[in-house]
Structure formats: structure tokens, C-alpha cells
Amino acid sequence: MITRFKTRTLALAATLCCTVAAASAADVKPRLIRFGYGLNEDSVQGRAARHLAQELQKISDGKLKMKTFGSASLGSDEQMQGALVGGVQEMMVGSTAPLAGMVKEFGMFDLPFLFNSEKEADAVLDGPLGQDLLKKLEAKGLVGLVYWENGFRNLTNSKRPIVRAEDLQGIKLRVMQNQIALGVFNALGANAVPMPFSELFTALETRTVDGQENPITTIQSSKFYEVQPYLTITRHVYTPWVVLASKKWWDGLSADEQRLIRQAAASSRDFERKDSRADSQKAMGILESAGMKINTVSEQEVARMRQTVQPVVDKYTQELGPELIKQLNDEIGKARN
Ligand code: TK8
């Protein structure tokens, strides 16, 4: 009796479940999503891209298939942004720095010595300011989904240890492609050279440039230690990555498809930040055993560097809007306390 009742309940539940599943499945078409990124497969980006693809496959019952393309095989960050705007590529992850050419406010993340910790960065990126910036992309043909951690950047070069800013004199330093990054490093005395990341390893290897700056995780996964003997821990800026979709393509998706992609993107964000923080420790050990000569700039020296770049910060505070920079500092202040 009880058994028969249970069986019937189960059968009913099963029918209900599958009706619901079928209904939602009706709004999800089989699709192939091309997702491009700049680092190699064995990097924080590579691992998080695979996580995103698997998650999406799982929650869409295999309908939303993502194919991931690493090592800038679909182009540099800037080229992929263009492909997304044009609707010839569906998704990507890339730095905020080259987005400043479209939405200038993204340049704020290139202002030096802003965040003190990952926690502060998370709070600002996931808070009102970071989310407003993502919305601004829509008018430019991009849908900003979530921020991943790229992280605090440090200097490497092939000439000498950087103990003081003066040591940067005459060093040809590759920087990300925007005016603020350029202004900051020129102010510090380097000869800043903007260049896409995809050309960087070769440029370092052939000594077209002497140095570059990126988080420890990237210095390790991109094997910069093979061509850069000196690493200086400066943590001069925290830069994020942003997961983007083509607006042209996005607008043709059903609400269910958009919801599933947003859900998978949020999962990739959590996965990637955790992985990045754990990998940072591990990568440092690898760089040490690879024989890099590592030094950390002193607090006094950081204070001097801050002073040296202040005119650049002031200039871009005016250009980006003093109100916006005030909001940024307020949100950082809140997260700090
Ligand atoms: C990878 C870049 C990279 C960034 C840079 O495509 O350009 O130096 O740090 O992560 O976005």
C-alpha cells in the first residue's frame, strides 16, 4: 500500500520534473560559442575558461557548447573586442585596459597604488561602480558579464634589479595599451612602449623591449622567467579581466539562454578568483626555483613612487571625472574598514 503510494508520487514527481525541464529546454537552442583569451591553456585564464565551458554545458543539458581558444589564437584583446562588436565572435575574456579606448572610465583601474588587497578590488568590481562600468559597454556593442582576477602587477626586466624608481631610467618597458599606463611608467622614468600582450614574449626574447609588468601568475604561466632575469615586487596596480559577450549576438539569445550564460559566468568568476589566489603562491615558488633574482621595493620607495606619479593621477582624475574617482575612493574606503 505504502509502496504503491510512494511509487505513484514518484511517478508524478518525475512527470512534473520533466515537464518543467522540457519547457525550459524549449528556450535553449543548440549553440556553439567561441570564447577567446590571451594566456595559454595552462594558466589561470585557461583553467577558468574550461570551467566556464563545462559549467555551461552542464546547466544547459549540453545545448550551449563553448569552444575555448587560448594564446590569443583568435587575436589580441583589442582585436577580439572588435570581433565581438562586429558580431563575428561570441565571447572572450580580456583586460580592462584596452577597453578604455571605448569607455574611458575603465582607465581608472590603471591608476597606480589604488587597491591594497584583493578583497578591496572584489568589493569595488562587484559593487555599484564596477557594475555601472559594465553597463556602459552595451552602448558600444559589448555585454560585460563578470570580472575575473588578473591581479597585482609586478615588474620584470633583463637589465637590473629595480630598487628605486631611478633604476627604471632607460628601460624599455612594455605597457598595456592605454594612456594612463603609458603616462605612469614614463613618469617613473622608463621608456614605456604600448604593445598587445600577444606580441610580448617575442619582444622580450628579441630584446625589442627590456621589461614588462604583470601578475606573478602570468609571469610564471607565460614563462617570462626564461627571458627576464629580474623580478621586482611592486604591486603597483591591480588590474582585472572582464568576461565579455558580443551584444549583436547576445540580443539574439532567449532570456533563458542569457540567464544560463550569466549563471555559468558567475560560477567561473568564483572559481577563477580562488584559483588565482592559490596559484599566485605556487607561481612564486616556481619563479624562485627558476633562478629569477627577486627583490621587493621598500615602503619608503613605494611612497616616493606614489609622489612621482601623482601628477599623472591628478591629470587623469580630471579627465575621468573627479566625482567618479571620489566614488571609487569612497568604495575602496568602505571595503578597507
Ligand atoms: C592577456 C592580457 C594580459 C594583461 C596584459 O590577453 O596585457 O599585460 O595583463 O593578461 O589581458
Image (spheres, rainbow, N blue to C red):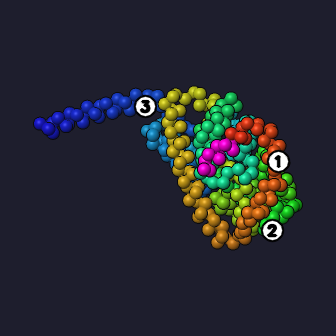
Q: Is residue 61 left or right of residue 121?
A: left
Q: Is residue 330 magenta?
A: yes
Residue beneath label 1, please?
312
Instruction: State the image coordinates of residue 152 (x, y, percent, origin top left).
Output: 67, 55
For the residue marked with disc 3, what is the amino acid?
Answer: Ala
N-terminal of the pair, mark 2 or mark 1, is: 2
For the residue marked with disc 1, what is the amino acid?
Answer: Val
Q: Is residue 325 left or right of residue 65?
A: right
Disc 1 element: helix
Residue beneath label 2, please?
160
| Residue at 63% from the left image edge and 65% from the top image edge | 284
Nearest to the eye among marks 3 and 2: give it.
2
Q: Which residues are magenta?
A: 328-337
Question: In the image, is residue 222 above or below residue 35?
Answer: below
Q: Is residue 285 visible?
A: yes
Q: Name the foreground residue: 236 vs 32.
A: 236
Q: CA distance from mark 2 to mark 1?
A: 25 Å
